[in-house]
Amino acid sequence: MIKNKLKIISLIFATILLLSCKNDNKPTLNQLPSLKGKNILMVYGGWKGHQPAVFVAKVSKWLESSGAKITLSDSLEVYTNKKIMDATDLIIQYWTMGEITKEQFLGLETAIKKGVGLAGCHGGLADSFRQNPEYQYIIGGQWVEHPGKKIDYTVNILDINDPISDGIKDFEIKDTEQYYMHVDPNIKVLATTKFSDSIHLWIKDRVMPIAWKTYYGDGRVFYLSIGHDPKDFDTLEAKELLFRGIRWASGSKYEPKENTLSAVYE
């Protein structure tokens, strides 16, 4: 009888230990920061073809339903407003091309260095301010081309142990742009895509990052290249990647700094 009890107790402890190890090794969605009470600044504008106002309307509904406090600006001048920037936890920018002044850029850069997060997608973050390489330095990548323009392609989840991408399966995205980019080879890549030779023969089988996370100073930076049209986020997996990335980036001021270094050439 005593032996049986000891066996049961041993089995219970072994199960607890196994579950503990599993939780340590496999991050879950619950590890992402909450948006409740967070101050989020959404800055939108630039090229009208990306429908920046439609994007903001769509995404702000998700954020408000999660308890975030939203400030909207259709002017880059908000980056010079120290009072707003100091109170901001996260910036979501959707501003394609255009130009940013030295003062506006300094306000944005200073805030991120101090721990304000930055998140965004497609040309609204990685094709902004083409004449400003310092801005591209913050993002960790820059748009170069979208072969074939609007096409169907596959998104492959690369990092299944990161809470942003954990549990999301590879998926198809329809009738949108597949970005070819120049990227920092040290960013932590979460998802990729592969090019075919249907448009350009020389890019066949080239793999390109499609979602990543990095730091600039103390600020978390999240980028997703999906998002040419706001309808792209009717695809559940695309919406989930963006929303989780936003949650992660919102935690700069409150969460321990992660090691996102993932150098390709080591």
Image (cartoon, grey):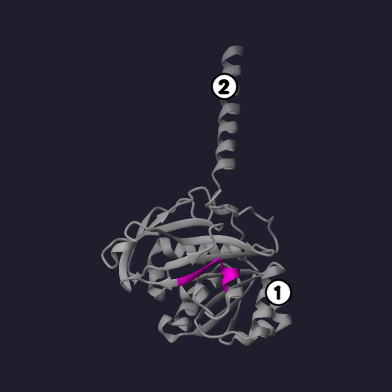
Count every numbered label the image shows and give the total: 2
- Using the image as rendered, state which of residue 237 and residue 152 is in the foreground: 152
The numbered mark at residue 20 is: none
Q: Residue at x 56, y 36 (%)?
A: 19
Q: Residue at x 42, y 80 (%)?
A: 50
- Using the image as rendered, state which of residue 178 and residue 250 is in the foreground: 178
The residue identified by callout 1 is 110
Mark 2 to mark 1: distance in Å?
Answer: 58 Å
The residue identified by callout 2 is 8
Q: Are marks 2 and 1 in contact (CB under 8 Å)?
A: no
- Residue 179 found in image quarter: bottom left
Give the magenta part as a residue range. Answer: 136-143
Q: Residue furthest left?
A: 198
Q: Is residue 145 above or below residue 247?
A: below
| Residue type beneath disc 1 | Thr
- Using the image as rendered, state which of residue 36 and residue 246 is in the foreground: 246
Badge 1: residue crowd in 10 Å (few <14, some 14–19, many ≥20): some
* Residue 30 image offset from top left, x and y in percent: 57, 53
- Residue 205 found in image quarter: bottom left
Q: Secondary structure at mark 1?
A: helix
Q: Is residue 14 above or below residue 78?
A: above
- Using the image as rendered, state which of residue 2 and residue 203 is in the foreground: 203
Q: Earlier in the sequence, mark 2 or mark 1?
A: 2
Q: Residue at x 40, y 72 (%)?
A: 145
